[in-house]
Amino acid sequence: DSYSLLILPGDGIGPEVMAEVRKIIDWFQSNRGMRFDVSEDLVGGAAYDVHGKPITDETMAKAQSVDAVLLGAVGGPAYDNLDFSVKPERALLRLRKEMDLFANLRPAQCFDALADFSSLKREVVSGLDILIVRELTSGVYFGEPRGIHSDGNNPENEGGRVGINTQRYTSGEIRRVARAAFELARKRKNRLCSMEKANVMESGVLWREEVQWVHDNEYPEVELTHMYADNGAMQLVRRPSQFDVIVTDNLFGDILSDAAAMLTGSLGMLPSASLGVPAANGRPKAMYEPVHGSAPDIAGQGKANPIACILSFAMALRYSYNEGAAADELEAAVERVLAQGARTADLMGPEGGTPIGTAEMGDRIVA
Ligand code: NAI
Ligand code: MG
């Protein structure tokens, strides 16, 4: 049985970092008896150059049929003035929407060798490994009614306008992201913390009740706690290691995951995943990608950090292919290489030193 993978390198440094993931895949095939059925396609500006659109229907169909999609990055100055309908970013939106990727996974993982890059004290973040699961397709960013309206002739309202957004969650939307989070917790330390504001929001009350329902009926063996999201923000900065998996809504997840990202330092280190509904074989629709963009300022120079993309592949091993031991092995290799002092330019501290390039970082991790 082979693992199907669609690779979409994209633009800028995307193809450069993806070449290093290819080496990792080859290593696992040669040394761990895994078989990957890898296909590769164009996305973003690279697809626009050839097809006049950022992703074709054929590529979309392929993305829908594989176990996992691994995407590099899209965009760049050459495409900044294109019509919105064919902008590279539209490919990401289309993939997320048509694959219904409702659970966005943002790990905050701090390798000991990089603990001094954190905005927090070394002892607070060293060895940190938490996972934030953000609901991605509903909530206040999408709820109706929304808009900016005139407030009639209300004399009490200076300016006379009102801006409206609606936080709206269905029980079904909450249950499916809760289920995804419980599944992830089971593959980790078996602990889930759900964050909302049930003290002041109806959607928060429903969120808490439905997450508890999924726990009681389907995952009673996972340890579940609830926390108000504002306290959660404080706790993430105070003592982040108290968490394993955190599940929260779209808005709180947006903010909490950006805050958590800064616990660990460089953009070149941050992986992510977006998951949808499990298919018949139990594997969820899934897309993995580094958090960073196409980095046009360093593209083509062979100095991009490939680790964010490599760690995104490690997430695919763990969450799509159920190869947790292989994911651990890959993450340990990254940790060891960093501990030996290997640094791409983005990881150079004020003490200086000689940075290595993209390919050498990949080679060292393989070694
Ligand atoms: P960016 O993430 O591409 O770059 C921000 C800064 O971080 C740059 O100085 C870059 O050199 C550095 N950087 C990023 N990744 C790095 C890596 N792996 N190694 C070393 N340094 C790294 O964000 P920016 O500059 O705002 O956007 C550039 C282009 O990328 C734009 O066209 C934007 O639309 C697109 N973009 C695409 C994303 C995606 O494909 N998911 C996400 C964010 C931006
Ligand atoms: Mg954000």
Image (cartoon, rainbow, N blue to C red):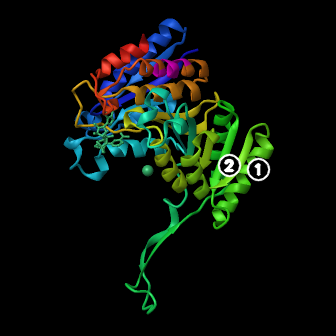
Q: Amino acid at mark 1?
A: Trp
Q: Which residues are magenta?
A: 329-335
- The residue sitting at 54% across, 24% down in the picture is 317
Asked if the residue under mark 2 is in contact with the one under mark 1, i.e. CB atoms within 8 Å, the reply is yes
Image location (x, y in percent) of residue 63 = 46, 32
Q: Is residue 80 magenta?
A: no
Name the one closer to the observer, 61 or 181. 181
Q: Which mark is residue 138?
A: none
- x and y percent of residue 193 in the render? 66, 46
Label 1 to label 2, Cα distance in Å? 8 Å
Work out whether residue 329 or residue 289 is closer to the camera in this orientation and state it. 329
Say whether residue 138 is left or right of residue 8. right
Which one is in front, 58 or 305?
305
Residue tagged 1: 213
The secondary structure that dominates the magenta segment is helix
Residue bearing the label numbered 2: 175
Q: Is residue 125 visible?
A: yes
Q: Residue at x 46, y 47 (%)?
A: 258
* Figure label count: 2
Q: Amino acid at mark 2?
A: Arg
